[in-house]
Amino acid sequence: MAAGGSLLSTLFGGCLTHLPNYPRLTLRINNFDDKKHWVKVEFYRENQNERSEAIAFDREFELQARPEDRPTYTLKKQNVVKSQPYIVRVSLIDLPAIREEYRFYPDCDESGESSEILYINIKEEEYNHHPSILFDQNVCSENSWWY
């Protein structure tokens, strides 16, 4: 039995050193509003048949109100998921009618030199004074603006 365990560790030990080092996605949630909000963030893998297979990330966060002396309150979560295409759904739990969806496509290569960052911004609309959800992401490749 010990010999079998040793053989398995040798076989799998070599495989583990060759696993690809996928870039990870960092999440930055910015609250520009002067009110506190609860935010639900979900990442879904594309082309899956069941929710249990598709869901990669499902968390709720408490966002403090924007401090008086700063333009935003920022919550940063590093390395939340592997950087790959996702459907991202964000909703304000305290205001259920406020929700948005975003298609995330990675732009950074697998070298790990740059980090993928997805920005979720909560801002008050000027015309109706209700919060809205806006998305942005960093750009790593030099030619992404061509497309």
Image (cartoon, rainbow, N blue to C red):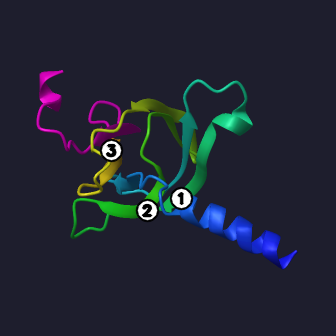
Q: Mark 3 falls on what kind of element?
A: strand
Q: Residues within 10 Å of mark 3 (few under 14, many from 20)?
A: some
Residue drawn at (49%, 63%) of the image: 17
- Between residues 142 and 43, which one lies in front from this camera angle? 142
Residue tagged 3: 123
Identify the secondary structure beneath mark 2: strand
Q: In the rendered structure, which segment of residues is drawn in magenta?
A: 125-147
User: Residue 81 at what x, y percent from top left?
Assistant: 49, 51
Looking at the image, can residue 65 be seen? no
Q: Residue at x 44, y 39 (%)?
A: 84
On the image, which quarter does residue 114 sit in? bottom left
Front position among marks 1 and 3: 1
Identify residue for label 1. 61
Q: Quadrant of residue 115?
A: bottom left
Image: 3 above or below 131: below
Q: Amino acid at mark 1?
A: Phe
On screen, residue 41 versus residue 126, left or right, reads right
The residue where tag 2 is placed is 77
Q: Is residue 136 magenta?
A: yes
Query: Could you say whether the residue bearing mark 1 is in a helix, strand or loop?
Result: strand
- Which amino acid type is marked by label 2? Lys
From the image, state whether disc 2 or disc 1 is nearer to you: 2
Front-lying residue, 122 or 131? 122
Mark 3 and mark 2 in contact? Answer it, CB < 8 Å: no
